[in-house]
Image (spheres, grey):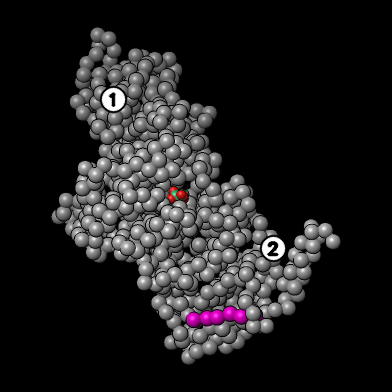
């Protein structure tokens, strides 16, 4: 027999053995033995990566609304990226990108336009992010900042009067899909002009056109168009369908605004939270490490607001005073650190964030939150400091300064430290050692691994020292073949989550990463939710996250498993047993990663009564390699049913499946 044949023979033998169901597995649950576990285990991690914010969750429909795109973001980009100068029906004019008179200095560019002869209009057109999707009957809020500098041309120039503007949504073919008329009149200062446009057709590729209808000179900036139907109807809000898909995950927390994005491409590119609050035209957009522009229209206020809207705890992350060590792939910076002379100010910036979130409205930063429309505190409790940083002396010195200042001024805040980008290795070891010595309450671990790695490491946290910092698994995903989302990868993550539930006394939080990806604009795969301008495509992995977050417990119920011959259970079987205290339900999860049915006997011991029926959710498919091709997920959803149960009963876990049984058990 050749070695190839031998391998085939062994694989077949294993398959026949499993399919024949020779060995069943008995899971014995002691319903009266419980330990508390994290009630907030499953959350989400949002990062502006893959066009997750601008062009994604942030509902702004105009791309490059304030003429701030730069060639440092992408070589072909500049202030006019996304814009076309239009001269209609005999109209003639000219335009310049101007930086002599910005709205605030943070946002240096604006557009100067001279209309020499109006014809049917001279102006600008913007096709949004791959086209603007509008729907019949929907209302859109248009706004623009304008300074009318002159009316008329040549000798007729006069710095007073009115310049008429026409704003319209147009189809690709030029049909008007809705319009509004405005007038610019103030020559001395920027004025915001607003109008509402109602769309009369549904198209996916409209453009916004702003036409000046008389000769004159005008400055324009911050040209914006929002659907009125944002998530919860918030102004400067979020795209409803995407926000809804996130809300349906019922995440217990939201980590934001990113991972690498936070510690940025060199120290001048750190995410500075103060740049992201206040009136949007005053926010200081910048390039992000993923090589596109972030307007910061979706900023700290909007993040906190979103957390509150979906009932999730906010978990912001600030840079630990150093930049991303991987900056080298863009501009060759490597890890840079804030000069020590500037660190006191940086530490204060972190303390100010806590005041912004939690301070009374009479406090300096609390008053800014109140001015934005939220006088009550946001109830911030957790703060991440650092993201997968290289554990260098510079990092340690700066982390310690931030950590000790927060601990002293805000002992109520739980700081989460960092332990490198991998589940082991130098930065992992050094990060953990440093955090333990310093007494940091929680450490953030990250891993992107194969499905097999997850199955092979299900006991990882069983032996973690409970006296050390707790764990936040801030980023994880199982990368199947060619980094695709498959049922196989989703089941590996489900198995992993059962192990986190079992260790929910030491693992406080876990979030899959990345969360969002716009089709054709991905810098990272796989992702949890794909989308385009009109549709949302959640993955099978999303289903798993949703099933776990909606069926999490706050107590671990003791259980053990063995095969009928008293052996170790198969390596592709995982289970967990938790209780949801509010309802009293016992929730049993079983993940069968094998291509064959796994016969299981469930024995419920202990003082709790056993109901006659349990509800059941099953996520499965015959082929584990079923994938989310090009962002389109196959329809694999959990099927709901109910089953008869007893103090001891048999259950067949389908091939490639996650089963969730809910047994009502009143004390
Ligand atoms: O989730 C994508 C990236 O992976 C994060 O930005 C970073 O923290 C990690 O390397």
Q: Secondary structure at mark 1?
A: loop
Q: Can residue 126 be seen from the camera position used here?
A: no
Q: Magenta residues, as a range?
A: 558-563
User: In the rendering, at what x and y percent does residue 271 appear?
Assistant: 33, 44
Point out the residue furthest to the left here.
362
* Residue 570 or residue 135, whichever sits in front: 570
Q: Can residue 473 be seen from the camera position used here?
A: yes
The answer to whether the beta carbon of the residue marked 1 is less than 8 Å from any atom of ligand 1 is no
Secondary structure mainly formed by the magenta segment: strand
Q: Please name the residue shown 59% across and 51% down the image.
A: 484
Per the rendering, the mark at residue 622 is 2
* Residue 323 or residue 64, whichever sits in front: 323
Mark 2 is surrounded, within 10 Å at the Cα level, by few (under 14), some (14 to 19) or many (20 or more) other residues, namely few
Q: Earlier in the sequence, mark 1 or mark 2?
A: 1
Q: Please name the residue shown 70% across and 79% down the image.
A: 23
Q: Please name the residue shown 21% across and 20% down the image.
A: 160
User: In the rendering, at what x and y percent does residue 109 appear?
Assistant: 31, 28
User: In the rendering, at what x and y percent does residue 617 appear?
Assistant: 57, 70
Q: Point out the image quarter for the N terminus.
A: bottom right
Mark 1 is surrounded, within 10 Å at the Cα level, by few (under 14), some (14 to 19) or many (20 or more) other residues, namely some
* Residue 390 or residue 647, whichever sits in front: 390
User: In the rendering, at what x and y percent does residue 147 appear?
Assistant: 26, 26
Q: Please name the residue shown 67% across and 79% down the image.
A: 24
Magenta stretch contains residue 625: no
Per the rendering, the mark at residue 64 is none
Going by the image, does 343 lie left or right of 199? left
Point out the residue furthest to the bottom here.
607
Magenta stretch contains residue 561: yes
Above-or-below relation of 650 to 616:
below
Calculate the distance from the C-alpha at mark 1 to the C-alpha at mark 2: 61 Å
Which residue position holds label 1? 99
């Amino acid at each position: 027999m050749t070695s190839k044949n031998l391998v085939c023979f062994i694989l077949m033998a294993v398959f026949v053995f499993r399919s024949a169901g020779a060995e069943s597995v008995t899971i014995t649950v002691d319903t009266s033995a419980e330990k508390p576990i994290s009630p907030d285990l499953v959350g989400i991690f949002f990062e502006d990566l893959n066009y997750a914010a601008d062009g994604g969750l942030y509902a702004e429909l105009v791309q490059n609304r304030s003429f701030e795109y730069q060639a440092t973001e992408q070589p072909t980009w500049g202030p006019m990226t996304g814009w076309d100068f239009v001269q209609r029906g005999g109209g003639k004019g000219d335009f310049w990108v101007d930086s002599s008179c910005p709205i605030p200095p943070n946002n240096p560019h604006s557009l100067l336009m001279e209309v020499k002869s109006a014809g049917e209009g001279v102006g600008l057109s913007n096709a949004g992010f791959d086209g603007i999707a509008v729907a019949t009957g929907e209302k859109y809020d248009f706004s623009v900042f304008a300074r009318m500098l002159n009316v008329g041309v040549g000798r007729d120039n006069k710095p007073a009067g009115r310049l008429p503007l026409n704003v319209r949504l147009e189809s690709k073919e030029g049909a008007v899909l809705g319009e509004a008329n405005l007038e610019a009149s103030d020559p001395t200062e920027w004025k915001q002009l607003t109008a509402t446009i109602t769309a009369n057709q549904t198209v996916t590729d409209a453009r916004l056109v702003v036409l000046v209808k008389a000769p004159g000179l005008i400055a324009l900036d911050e040209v914006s168009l929002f659907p009125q139907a944002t998530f919860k109807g918030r102004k400067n809000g979020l795209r409803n369908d995407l926000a809804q898909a996130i809300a349906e995950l019922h995440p217990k927390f939201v980590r934001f605004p990113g991972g690498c994005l936070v510690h940025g491409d060199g120290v001048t590119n750190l995410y500075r939270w103060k740049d992201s609050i206040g009136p949007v035209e005053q926010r200081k957009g910048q390039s992000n490490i993923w090589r596109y522009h972030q307007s910061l229209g979706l900023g700290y206020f909007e993040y906190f607001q979103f957390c509150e809207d979906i009932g999730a705890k906010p978990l912001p992350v600030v840079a630990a005073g150093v930049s991303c060590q991987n900056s080298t792939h863009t501009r060759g910076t490597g890890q840079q650190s804030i000069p020590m002379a500037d660190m006191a100010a940086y530490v204060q910036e972190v303390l100010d964030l806590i005041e912004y979130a939690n301070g009374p409205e009479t406090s300096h930063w609390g008053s800014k939150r109140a001015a934005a429309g939220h006088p009550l505190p946001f109830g911030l409790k957790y703060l991440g400091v650092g993201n997968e940083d290289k554990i260098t002396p510079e990092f340690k010195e700066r982390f310690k300064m931030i950590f000790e200042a927060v601990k002293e001024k805000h002992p109520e805040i739980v700081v989460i430290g960092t332990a490198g980008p991998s589940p082991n290795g130098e930065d992992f070891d050094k990060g953990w050692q440093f955090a333990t010595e310093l007494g940091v309450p929680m450490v953030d671990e990250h891993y992107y691994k194969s499905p097999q790695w997850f199955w092979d490491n299900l006991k990882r946290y069983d032996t973690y020292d409970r006296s050390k910092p707790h764990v936040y698994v801030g980023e994880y995903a199982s990368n199947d073949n060619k980094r695709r989302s498959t049922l196989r990868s989703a089941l590996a993550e489900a198995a992993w989550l059962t192990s986190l539930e079992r260790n929910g006394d030491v693992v406080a939080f876990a979030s899959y990463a990345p969360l969002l990806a716009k089709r054709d604009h991905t810098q990272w795969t796989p992702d949890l939710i794909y989308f385009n301008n009109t549709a949302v495509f959640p993955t099978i992995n999303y289903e798993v996250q949703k099933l776990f977050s909606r069926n999490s417990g706050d107590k671990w119920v003791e259980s053990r498993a063995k095969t009928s011959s008293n052996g170790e259970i198969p390596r592709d079987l995982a289970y967990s047993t938790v209780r949801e205290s509010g309802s009293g339900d016992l929730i049993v999860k079983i993940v069968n990663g094998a291509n064959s049915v796994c016969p299981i006997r469930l024995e419920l011991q202990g003082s709790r009564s056993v109901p006659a029926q349990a509800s059941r959710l099953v996520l499965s498919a015959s082929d584990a390699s079923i994938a989310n091709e090009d962002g389109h997920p196959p329809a694999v959803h959990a099927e709901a049913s109910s089953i008869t149960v007893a103090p001891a009963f048999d259950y067949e876990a389908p091939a490639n499946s996650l089963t969730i049984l809910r047994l009502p058990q009143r004390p």
